[in-house]
């Protein structure tokens, strides 16, 4: 008995179209990269891999890279401290948990969106132009857009909180601030902390990249090495960045577990 | 003596077309009143009106002789407390914090924050939990408790708040018969000890008759009967539940 033929449904067709689109895009990319893939590209790739397998490990250089890591970490922590405070304030305003006024919430969300509209590199160029090549410029360049992201994400989480326990607190006579501490914050705290830990990780990467702008740190060290085409010296700070990120990720996971317990 | 609660021609119209009232109701100090009626009769809405959480569209709510809408947050917390069927407690907090929340009407925001984060003596919370039989749960996370234990913690919070009128919404709807009787006995006992008035909505008329002095029956947003328990007959209750919408 022949099997009945089933007409493909809408989802199947959409899936096939999407796969076809991706396939065409990849083919085009391959075609464009053709000349670069052959010859010179392969040599550079080989040098890159060799550098990765044998990074510069002399004690003097390791010390230098460690100092760079400290600088990058300092930038990241400073920027995150500012961004967290500003972001939390913005989140409380944007969510309306303390004071719910439509114009206030809308205004706050617009400001947050504006801070996010430029990448931290763009902000870095702006701040460096305004205040010269100073650490403050680097810190602010990360802090401003990060405050925007934190404010937006945490603001949404605050707004999505279960209102029933908060109403019960109001019935017990709690002030708006007490309702925030007892009813709203405990509901978002574990997720919020996890998110902030993730943002710190991102801040580390941003700080490493920003140091290309000349502010000192791991990115600057990588750039110096690459300028001399010394891949071995370039990979040491790259590994250091990796270690920093893994460390922060681990710390974040631990903090989340402790709070969720 | 001034009644603890008086609803005077109170009316409320909800968006879904539901309408409560007009209702007239008086609760005197120390009275234990059960509010019975089928689902959708308006029991929860009436309790919300009485607590001041909702304002009536028409009519007035009086608490201890004063207009409820003119009372400040703290004054109202001293006069009336409302306990819901579920979802009153903050699951992520420890039991101690949830019980201490009953004092938020009296504490400043700073003291509230310190009690939350700092190591603090909690004698009131301890006493209240002991009264409901949950002293051992003081430091446990609220999410770990059973349904019945949740109810008792909410009751402990109400005890700590110590209002003149306790409003309780369907406290035993999700409990088995044994736990239901235990909780209602506890509730009635706590009300009696403090000379507090109690207005409690219930599904089960038998429980109402057993633990309360007075029965108020509601149907379709109106009060249809208001009698002392000894005067209530099974036929009256059947009429409230069986006629009209199921």
Image (spheres, coloured by chain):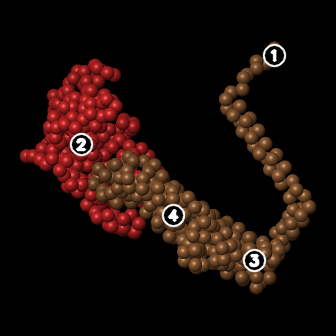
Chain colours: A brown, B red
Q: In this view, does B141 lie above or below A232?
A: above
The secondary element bearing badge 4 is classed as helix
From the viewer's perspective, tell me whether residue A98 is left or right of residue A211: left
The answer to which of B44 and B15 lies nearer the viewer is B15
> In percent of the image, x 83 and y 54: which residue is there?
A33
**Residue B39: image x %, image y %?**
33, 30
Q: Which residue lies furthest to the right in this view?
A: A39
**Residue A257: image x %, image y %?**
56, 60
Q: Name the residue under label 1.
A: A2
Q: Name the residue under label 4.
A: A147
Q: Is residue B179 above or below residue A130?
A: above
User: Are dots 3 and 2 in contact, CB under 8 Å?
Assistant: no
Quarter location, residue B11: top left
The secondary element bearing badge 2 is classed as loop
Quarter location, residue B113: bottom left
**Residue B116: image x %, image y %?**
39, 63
The answer to which of B182 and A257 lies nearer the viewer is A257
Q: Name the residue under label 2.
A: B55
> In percent of the image, x 32 and y 66: which residue is there?
B111
């Amino acid at each position: 008995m022949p099997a009945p033929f089933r007409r493909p449904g809408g989802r199947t067709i959409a899936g096939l179209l999407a796969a076809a689109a991706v396939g065409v895009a990849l083919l085009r990319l391959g075609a464009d990269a053709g000349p670069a893939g052959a010859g010179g590209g392969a040599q550079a790739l080989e040098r890159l891999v060799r550098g990765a397998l044998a990074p510069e490990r002399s004690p003097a250089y390791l010390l230098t890279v460690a100092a760079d890591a400290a600088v990058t970490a300092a930038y990241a922590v400073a920027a995150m401290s500012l961004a967290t405070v500003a972001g939390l304030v913005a989140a409380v305003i944007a969510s309306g948990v303390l004071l719910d006024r439509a114009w206030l919430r809308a205004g706050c969300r617009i400001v947050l969106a504006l801070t996010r509209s430029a990448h931290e590199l763009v902000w870095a160029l702006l701040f460096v132009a305004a205040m010269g090549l100073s650490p403050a410029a680097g810190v602010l360049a990360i802090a401003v857009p990060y405050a925007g992201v934190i404010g937006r994400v945490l603001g949404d989480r605050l707004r999505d909180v279960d209102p029933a326990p908060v109403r019960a607190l109001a019935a017990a006579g709690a002030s708006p601030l007490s309702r925030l501490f007892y009813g709203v914050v405990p509901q978002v705290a574990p997720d919020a902390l996890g998110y902030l830990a993730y943002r710190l990780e991102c801040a580390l990467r941003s700080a490493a990249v920003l140091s290309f702008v000349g502010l000192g740190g791991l990115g600057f060290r990588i750039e110096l090495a690459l300028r001399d085409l010394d891949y071995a010296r370039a990979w040491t700070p790259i590994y250091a960045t990796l270690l920093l990120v893994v460390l922060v990720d681990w710390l974040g996971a631990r903090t989340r577990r402790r709070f969720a317990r | 003596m001034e009644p603890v609660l008086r609803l005077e021609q109170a009316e409320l119209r909800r968006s879904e077309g539901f309408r409560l009232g007009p209702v007239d109701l008086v609760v005197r100090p120390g009275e234990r009143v059960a509010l019975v009626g089928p689902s959708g009769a308006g029991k929860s809405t009436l309790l919300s009106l009485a607590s001041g959480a909702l304002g009536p569209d028409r009519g007035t709510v009086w608490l201890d002789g004063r207009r409820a809408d003119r009372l400040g947050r703290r004054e109202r917390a001293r006069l009336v407390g409302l306990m819901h069927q579920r979802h009153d407690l903050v699951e992520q907090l420890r039991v101690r914090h949830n019980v201490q929340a009953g004092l938020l009407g009296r504490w400043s925001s700073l003291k509230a924050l310190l009690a939350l984060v700092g190591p603090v003596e909690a004698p009131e919370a301890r006493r209240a939990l002991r009264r409901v039989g949950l002293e051992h749960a003081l430091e446990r996370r609220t999410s770990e408790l059973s349904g019945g234990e949740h109810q008792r913690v909410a009751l402990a919070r109400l005890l700590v708040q110590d209002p003149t009128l306790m409003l309780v919404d369907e406290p035993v709807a999700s409990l088995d018969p044994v736990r239901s009787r235990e909780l209602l006995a506890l509730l009635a006992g706590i009300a009696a000890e403090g000379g507090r008035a109690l207005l409690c909505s219930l599904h089960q008329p038998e429980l109402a008759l057993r633990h309360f002095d007075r029965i108020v029956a509601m149907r379709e947003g109106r009060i249809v009967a208001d009698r002392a328990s000894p005067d209530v007959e099974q036929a009256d209750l059947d009429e409230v539940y069986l006629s009209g919408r199921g």
